[in-house]
Amino acid sequence: MRRSTPASPRSTRPTRTRTPRRRSSSQGARGQRREGLEIFTKVYFPTGPKGPNDTGLSRKHILESINGSLKRLGTDYVDLYQAHRFDYETPLEETFQAFADVVRQGKALYIGVSEWTASSCRTATRWRRSSACS
């Protein structure tokens, strides 16, 4: 019968790898070929001192948030800009006009939603089909 030997103390020490440290998302786009990246960002939660315009999907918050995201990411546009939550306080018209302006300005290629209920998506779709927003 063969006896197993205990592991040497050296084998239990953490090892250092030669891989570079993971960069924070704010540094992720710098030094990379932009066309080779897909960059997504969301808007809804506070990005400022929690004033009345620092949260939600108001035009002011959407535009200030995209500008702040672009600056932090070190890029001139994102591939996908998402409405993180449905905002019951802001009219859909205001929200989607602001998103359309973000796309027209070239700051985002596509608009999306995250954590919206099916009912909220249907409401937005019905509004979009009946509006002149382009």
Image (cartoon, helix red, strand yellow):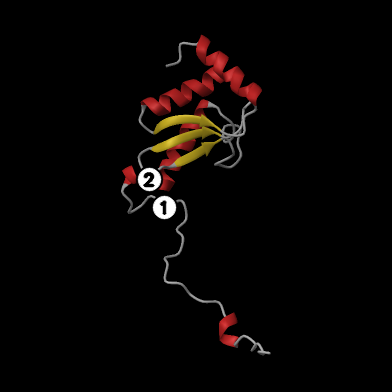
Tag 1–tag 2 contact (CB < 8 Å): yes
Q: How many marks?
A: 2
Q: Residue furthest front?
A: 1
Instruction: Look at the image and tell me in which quarter the N terminus lies.
Output: bottom right
Instruction: Judge from the rendering whether residue 6 lies leftward or rightward of residue 25; answer left or right.
Output: right
Query: Which element is circle 1 on?
Result: loop
Residue 5 percent across, percent down from the top left: 64, 89
Query: Which element is circle 2 on?
Result: loop
Residue identified by numbered label 2: 37
Residue 67 percent across, percent down from the top left: 43, 38
Residue 104 percent across, percent down from the top left: 37, 25
Q: Nearer the viewer, residue 53 or 20?
A: 20
**Residue type pointed to by label 2:** Leu
Q: Nearer the viewer, residue 13 or 73?
A: 13
Q: Which mark is residue 28?
A: 1
Residue drawn at 61 percent across, 39 percent down: 50
Q: Would you call the spot at circle 2 few (<14 residues within 10 Å), some (14-19), or many (20 or more)?
A: few
Residue 42, placed above or below residue 33 = above
**Residue type pointed to by label 1:** Gly
Rounded to the nearest angstrom, the CA distance separating label 1 from label 2 is 9 Å
Residue drawn at 46 percent across, 40 percent down: 40
Q: Nearer the viewer, residue 9 or 62?
A: 9
Residue 126, placed above or below residue 30 = above
Residue drawn at 38 percent across, 45 percent down: 37
Whether residue 90 is visible: no
